[in-house]
Each structure stands twice: as structure tokens, then as C-alpha cells.
Amino acid sequence: MSMSVIHDEDTARCYVQQMCDAQALERLNYFLAALKDENTRQNLVAKPTLNIAWQRHIADSAQLLHHVPRETGLWLDLGTGAGLPGLVISILRPNRQMLLVESRRRRIDWLQRMVDELALDHCTIAGARLEHVESTPASVITARAFAPLASILDLSARFSTAQTVFVLPKGRSAAQELTGSSRKVRQMFHVEQSVTDDTAGILVGKLAKGLRRAS
């Protein structure tokens, strides 16, 4: 499939199917059904997006795999919320070590239930604010609707190495946030077009040594 923008649920589902096996697809269907059910009890995602969940949540999360290396290594997902993109990535790559950070109690409980019910043995939920999570080097750091770019880089610097890839879905603000960043950050990051929204962008890059704090 080409990397053109996905505009409907059928295309989104086909896009994801090409990235996974039958077991992963079954897990994604289970996850979506559970998400819709849980959303009646707590506001995990905006209700209108449930009608386009494959496009808005599953494919939107899955596309991040195109911007990260294939080798194993810790994937750190900040402010994972409903498990987007963290749970989706864990379903698609069940052998990859995942650490999902979330501080809200009800969401922590939901995430842990999904990890248990989906048997995602390599996925761990860190139920705390990021400031209280023990430093550990990450190969990939993602954050969807978590914080402005400058805050993300500051908060996650102690998890970053020279090889860490940041993949940050930023919607319509991607180019604007990058333009408003320091010259060093602009040199290290670039904007990738989202395949699920022709107005959205993903910031991709690595931190230079001078911008990484000691842990």
C-alpha cells in the first residue's frame, strides 16, 4: 500500500492488516471492542472518534512503526492514556519491550486489564507521573497529545541516548511547534506527514548530546 492519506475505515483496516498476523488482528478487534465499552464509563477517547476508530486510533498508532528501527529495545510511551499508541504497538510487536507511562488511576487500571487480557507479556504499565519513573535508556520515545515539544524533550531527556528515536504525533501543530523551537532542535527533528490525516504531522528526530540531561 502506498503512503497516501487514509480517509476511511476499510482502508485503515487494510493498512493495519498488512502490518500484522491473524493473532494481532484478533487482539486489535478485542481491544477496540473493550475500548468502546470502557469509554461509556470513563472518557478514554472523544466519543465521535469511535465511529472511525481504525483510522483515528489504530492506523494512526500503527504508522509510527514506519519511523523506528526494527531492532529490539525499550519503547517508552508517555502519557499513554487509553493505550494510544502504546497498546496498539504492543499488540503489533508483542515481543518488543514496552513501558507505558500513565498517572491517572482509572486509566492505569484499564491499561493493566488490557495487558492481562491480551497477554501482552512484554508490556509494562508505569502508574506514576513521568518525573517519578525510574530512569532507563529507551530506544524509542513516543507521546501522543501529552505535552508541547519543549516539555517532552525536557521531561524525557534522562531516558534518551544518542540512538533514541523520538516519534511524536503532533497533529496540525507539528510544523508550528518545530518552527517555534530552538535552532538546535530544528536541526535534529523533521516533520513526517501522517497517513491518517492530511493536515497532521509527526515530529521525528534524535537529541544531540548537549540537549540530554544526566539521569
Image (cartoon, grey):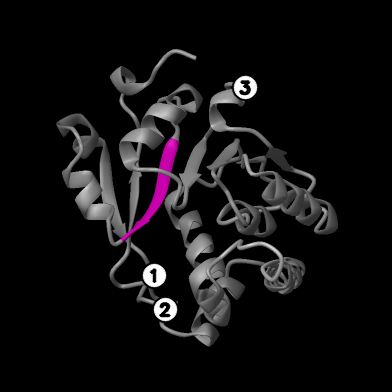
* Mark seen at residue 6: 2
Read off the residue under disc 3.
134
Disc 2 and disc 1 in contact, CB within 8 angstroms: yes
What amino acid is at disc 2?
A: Ile
Q: Is residue 139 left or right of residue 188?
A: right
Indicate the position of residue 177 as horizontal and vertical percent values: 24, 47
Give the extent of the magenta segment.
Answer: 165-171
C-alpha span from label 2 to label 1: 6 Å
The numbered dot on residue 108 is: none
Query: Crowdedness of circle 3 by 10 Å Cα count: few (<14), some, many (20+)?
Result: few
Mark pair 2, 3: CA separation: 38 Å
Considering the numbered disc 3 on the image, is that residue within a helix, a strand or a loop?
loop
Considering the numbered disc 2 on the image, is that residue within a helix, a strand or a loop? loop
- Point 43% across, 39% down: residue: 165
Residue 63 is left or right of residue 207, and the answer is right
Question: Where is residue 13 shown, x and y percent of the image?
Answer: 57, 79
Q: Residues within 10 Å of mark 2 (few under 14, many from 20)?
A: many
Residue at 32 percent of width and 64 percent of height: 200
